[in-house]
Amino acid sequence: MEQTVKKYVDGFMADLMAKNPGEKEFHQAVREVLESVAPYIIEHPYLMDMKILERIVEPERVVMFRVPWLNDEGEIQVNRGYRVQMNSAIGPYKGGIRFHPSVNLSIMKFLAFEQTFKNSLTTLPMGAGKGGSDFNPKGKSDNEVMKFCQSFMTELQRHIGQDTDVPAGDIGVGGREVGYMFGQYKRLRNEFTGTLTGKGISWGGSPLRPEATGYGTCYFAAAMLATKGDSFEGKTVVISGAGNVAQYAAMKSLQLGAKVLTMSDSNGYIYDPAGIDEEKLAYIMELKNVFRGRIREYVQKYPSAQYFENQRPWGIKCDIALPCATQNELDADDAQKLIDNGCICVAEGANMPSVPGAIEIFQKAKILYAPGKASNAGGVATSGLEMTQNSIRLKWTPEEVDKNLHRIMDDIHAACVKYGTEPDGYVNYVKGANIAAFIKVADAMMAQGLV
Ligand code: NDP
């Protein structure tokens, strides 16, 4: 059987790589899913006959467009915009928008592909998409960010809609950018609908949407720890990133009784042996969200902490690691350091932060390891709850949303355990997440015929 699976995976990947040359992040994301679902597909030959996997890896539509805008000096700038509409089998396309200079078609396709499985796991009726631009919001004035967002939306608005495709935030796209994009969408389409999620609380946003990804990641980690009769209480936590996901992962870790030791940005990380408590976290949130500063400034304010330029935090001894910055930010050496230092649980807040070699090390050591598509699904799930509130024109209380979010994370955890438990009792959350998500999407695609 193992040989048959390997042959199938290798053959499939060879075709995919030939058809999508140079898209290394996309290849990486597909391979990870393929390795999990191949045995299931081989056991169910009709899935092979129906070419379900061949159809899932092919986006339903990709839009790539010019985004021209004028900077504050009146100079013409040209960026490239993307929207990958990956899969609509179980609902309208849904997924974030990323503004970062590294954005390219491969990164958009990997994120949209992951989104297909993540959204399937949420239990909500959402298909998958992802978009973005190579625009770099860092160092730009509010006026420049607004002009860029307006130009981006001027084209994107043709392709989205509350029943078609509902974008949200991601790296470089937070409340400010969603606001500018929503304003332009509303102006051009003359409609006030729930076409974007992550909106401001007074104009259609859901309570707890900003918190949802970070909180959900911790709820998922707590569910994993509970399988060992353990919890966050008294644990040390190492977090990467200092953006939306990292901030609220830190907040929930503190609420659950843990001590947060690190946070980072793309220039380096801070290590505070005394712990980043509520007050220090409030400082970081103001520094990053209001002043758009750098994490290194933390050590000026709290001199007992240390700053490590151009380094990642994975060498710091901890019980729990929450990678919450970006893809491929935790390599095999980092994974080995975590294991050697006694880490028992890794839950990904970011998308695909661990390289395949790192995942292998976690799983070999049989620690609790959750892939982002399962553990960070709370963000898109709460976006789904925002869509529901927009449709029924009601706003729920934070408590109601939190209850739903917590339930959804527990349901995702249960699905992973159902499909990922190995004969020796170890839960392979990667396998569990991929198979549970795949079955739902595949069933929907089969039911809807060849479209
Ligand atoms: P933000 O832009 O708010 O924060 C991103 C953080 O990661 C910043 O601290 C940033 O540092 C750091 N970072 C970005 N790129 C790199 C890099 N190449 N190397 C090192 N650090 C980097 O984004 P989010 O918090 O929203 O997103 C973080 C991750 O979580 C992403 O993988 C995203 O796809 C994922 N995610 C987000 C969801 C959401 O609801 N927002 C939902 C599900 C997943 P700097 O300031 O220096 O750029």
Image (spheres, rainbow, N blue to C red):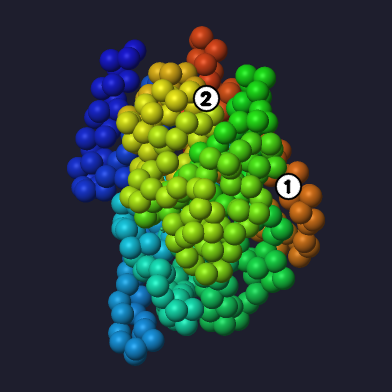
Whether residue 110 is situated above or below residue 47 in the rendered picture: below
Residue at the extreme front? 304
The quadrant the N terminus occupies is: top left
Q: Looking at the image, which residue is at 67% across and 64% down? A: 205
Crowding at dot 1, Cα within 10 Å, few <14 / some 14-19 / many 20+, comes out as many
Three-letter amino acid code of the residue under disc 1: Asp
Figure quadrant of residue 220: top right
CA separation in Å, label 2 and label 1: 26 Å
Q: Viewed as shown, does residue 382 lie left or right of 328?
A: right
Question: Compared with residue 381, is residue 320 higher up or lower down, i.e. above or below?
Answer: above
The local secondary structure at tag 1 comes to helix
Nearer to us of marks 2 and 1 is 2
Q: Secondary structure at mark 2?
A: loop
Where residue 334 appears, x then y in whole percent? 36, 33
Would you name the residue on which mark 1 appears? Answer: 402
The reply to whether residue 216 is visible in this rendering is: no
